[in-house]
Amino acid sequence: RLVRAVEIYELTNQPKSKAVPQSELCPQEPTSAHSSLNILILGLELKRSELHERIDQRTKEMFRDGWIDEVRALLEKGYGPNDPGIKSCGYREIMEAIESNQSIVEEVIEEVIAAKTRQYARRQLTWWRRDKRINWVKIY
């Protein structure tokens, strides 16, 4: 999207929001054949095991930094499972455990959240790999 926005600005001297009618905006517009920009798009590729380790480590850090208390505070402020920020990986699972009065077993919730995050990362990679403009670079 950023590439397309730059192309539109280069061609029209206007931001995309002014140059293109709202009805014509599309989230996945291909780059224009008329573009004078020569753009190299890089994707960084980790070993799957390294990606999983990073996800697991990040999940542990979030719990260590008080993720459960953060979700409790959000519940007290009136947020629920359908609010936009709560749809991020992990928040809904913690919220459901708190609301159902389950005894919170951090290790179990942590593993469930890490597994769901790994699945989400896999879906993201699948989506990105469909973009043939991306040149993938292995960083291992």
Image: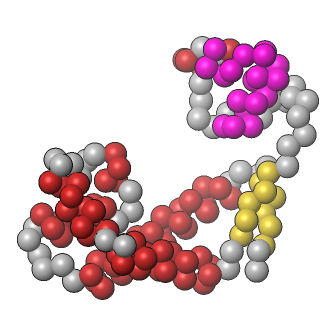
Residue that extends furthest to the left in the rendered view of this protein = 101
Horizontal side, residue 33 vs residue 61: left or right: right
Q: Could you tell me which residue is drawn at 61 percent across and 61 percent down?
A: 126
Image quadrant in which you'd find residue 9: top right
Percent across and percent down for residue 47 are 67, 79
Q: Is residue 22 above or below residue 98?
A: above
Magenta range is 1-18
Is residue 27 part of the magenta span, yes or no? no
Image quadrant in which you'd find residue 5: top right
Residue that extends furthest to the front in the rendered view of this protein = 65
Is residue 5 part of the magenta span, yes or no? yes
Horizontal side, residue 2 vs residue 12: left or right: left
Identify the image quadrant of the N terminus: top right
Horizontal side, residue 10 vs residue 23: left or right: right
Q: Could you tell me which residue is drawn at 78 percent across and 57 percent down?
A: 42
Q: Nearer the viewer, residue 61 or 80?
A: 61
The rendered magenta stretch, by its main secondary structure, is classed as helix
